[in-house]
Amino acid sequence: MSIGAGIALFAIGAILAFAVNVEVEWVNLDMIGYILMGAGLVIFLVGIVLMARRRRSESVTHTAVDPTANERVTRRSTSTPDDTVGL
């Protein structure tokens, strides 16, 4: 979702900076466009980083000896972060 929001902010900022030729006394639309483009770029990059971190998985293996049966017990667990966490 943040990748789409970043692209949307960048596009709106580009429209304000380059396509709108309206002069308003109390606000500079070009500067607002550049600010939105910068914010869109930052949000896009943060979204890419968060998506890359979400794809990691962890694998843990425990090996122990059962004292009552004198058997080796191996427990394996693999966890992958849920895609809905952090939205």
Image (cartoon, grey):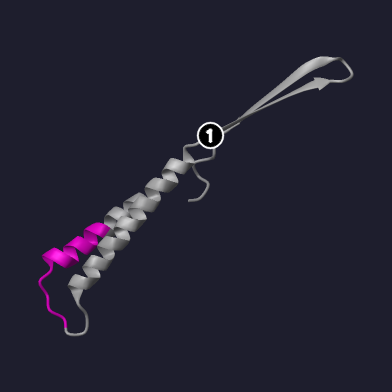
* Residue drawn at 87 percent across, 20 percent down: 67
**Along the viewing direction, whichever of 37 and 83 lies nearer the viewer:** 37
Tell me: residue 52, above or below residue 77: below
Position of 31 with respect to 1 (left or right) is left
* Residue drawn at 77 percent across, 23 percent down: 64
* Residue drawn at 33 percent across, 52 percent down: 44
Outermost residue, bottom direction? 25
Counting from the top left corner in percent of width and height, residue 39 is at 32, 62
Tell me: residue 25, above or below residue 35: below
Tell me: residue 28, above or below residue 42: below
Q: In which quarter of the image is residue 19?
A: bottom left
- What's the residue type where badge 1 is placed? Ser
Q: Is the magenta stretch mostly helix, strand or loop?
A: helix
Counting from the top left corner in percent of width and height, residue 14 is at 19, 61
Say few, some or many: other residues with alpha carbon within 10 Å of mark 1 (under 14 / 14 to 19 / 20 or more).
Answer: few
**Along the viewing direction, whichever of 42 and 83 lies nearer the viewer:** 42
Q: Is mark 1 on a helix, strand or loop?
A: loop
Counting from the top left corner in percent of width and height, residue 38 is at 28, 62
| Residue range of the region highlighted in magenta in the rendering | 10-24
Tell me: residue 59, above or below residue 30: above
Is 45 included in the stretch rendered in magenta?
Answer: no
Q: Is any atom of residue 73 visible in this view? A: yes
* Residue highlighted by disc 1: 57
Counting from the top left corner in percent of width and height, residue 62 is at 70, 26
* Residue drawn at 83 percent across, 20 percent down: 66
Position of 36 with respect to 24 (left or right) is right
Q: In which quarter of the image is residue 37?
A: bottom left
How many numbered badges does the structure rendering display? 1
Is 17 included in the stretch rendered in magenta?
Answer: yes
Outermost residue, right direction? 68
Q: Is any atom of residue 1 visible in this view? A: no
Outermost residue, left direction? 21
